[in-house]
Image: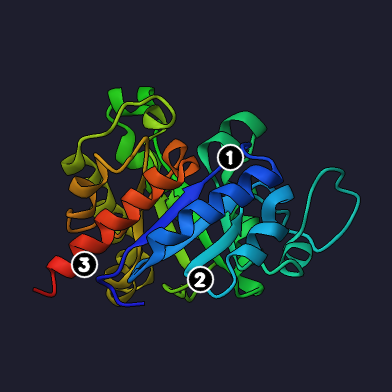
Amino acid sequence: MDQRDFVIAGNWKMHKTVEESKVFMHDFKPYLKNNRCKIILFVPYTNIESCVKLSAKTDICVGAQNFHWEDSGAFTGEISIKMLSGLGVKNYLVGHSERRRCFGETDDVINRKIKKAVSEDVSIVLCVGETHQQRESGAAIESVISQVKEGLSGINNINTSKIYIAYEPVWAIGTGRVANPQEVNQMCGCIRTCISDGWGAGTGEKFKILYGGSVDRKTCREFLLMSDINGVLVGGASLDPDEFGGIIGVANDILNEGND
C-alpha cells in the first residue's frame, strides 16, 4: 500500500444482526468502484463468517473487535486469533477506549494482545487517546504517548504494513463532538515522533496513523488533508452504507486530486 493511500476503518461495535450485516454489504459494495483505500470493517463476532464470504473478491477486509492473547484455555467468553483466523480474519482492533473503560483493559493487557498479534503476523489497529480531564489538565500528549509506548513495548521490529495506530480522543467518541483538525494533526505528529524515536526515523515516516472520533463524510475531508493523518476509524457513520461509502468517496477524491 502506497504511503499516499488511506486506511478507512469502520467499527460496528455491538450493532447489526447477521441479516442486517448482509443488507449493509449489499448496499455498500457499489461504493468500492475504483477504490484505492484499504477498507477494514470491524464487525461483531456473529457477523464475521457472513461478512467474510460477502466481501470475497472485494477491497473489504473484515476484522475482529477484540481477541485473547492465548490460543485456548479456561477463559469463558473469550476468543482467540487462532479461532478467528479459521474464519478468515486477518485484521484486529486493540485497545479501544471502550475496552479500556468498560472492561478494564490495561496497557499490559493490550501489550500482551499486540505481542500475540505480531507473533501470528496479523494486522492490528492500536487505539490510543486521552480523556477530557487529561486534555483539560494539559496531560493529553503525555497520556497518549504513554499508551503508545506501553502498547508497543517489547516489539523490536514494527511492520508498518501490519500495525496502525488510531488516535481517538475519548471525549469525541460517540458524542458528536469533533476535535480540531489541527490539534489532531499535532497529536498524530507527536505519535509519529515517538515511533521515530523508539523504532527509527524510517518507521515513524512510514507509519499509518488514523483519526477516530465522531467523523462522518461531512467532516472527514479536513482530517484526511492533514499531513500526519493517514485515514480514519469510523464509529456510528460506518453503520450506514451510504455514509460510510461517502467517506470512502471523499478519501478517493483526495487521492485522485493528488494525481492531477
Task: Name the amino acid type tagged 1.
Answer: Lys
**At numbered mark 2, what does the secondary structure look like: helix, strand or loop?**
loop
The quadrant in which the N terminus is found is bottom left
The residue indicated by pointer 3 is 255
**At numbered mark 3, what does the secondary structure look like: helix, strand or loop?**
helix
Q: Is residue 84 left or right of residue 226?
A: right
Q: Is residue 212 above or below residue 172?
A: below
**At numbered mark 1, what does the secondary structure look like: helix, strand or loop?**
loop
Q: Is residue 34 above or below residue 68?
A: below
Instruction: Tell which residue pokes out farthest to the left in this image.
Output: 260
Task: Name the amino acid type tagged 3.
Answer: Leu
Residue 76 appears at what percent x and percent y? 87, 43
Residue 170 appears at what percent x and percent y? 42, 32
> Residue 13: which disc?
1
Q: Residue at x 29, y 43 (%)?
A: 217
- Neighbourhood count class around disc 2 (C-alpha, 10 Å): few under 14, some 14–19, many 20 upward: few
Which of 80/129 is in front? 80
The residue indicated by pointer 2 is 58
The label nearer to you, 2 versus 1, is 2
Q: Residue at x 72, y 68 (%)?
A: 85
Q: Is residue 225 above or below residue 103?
A: below
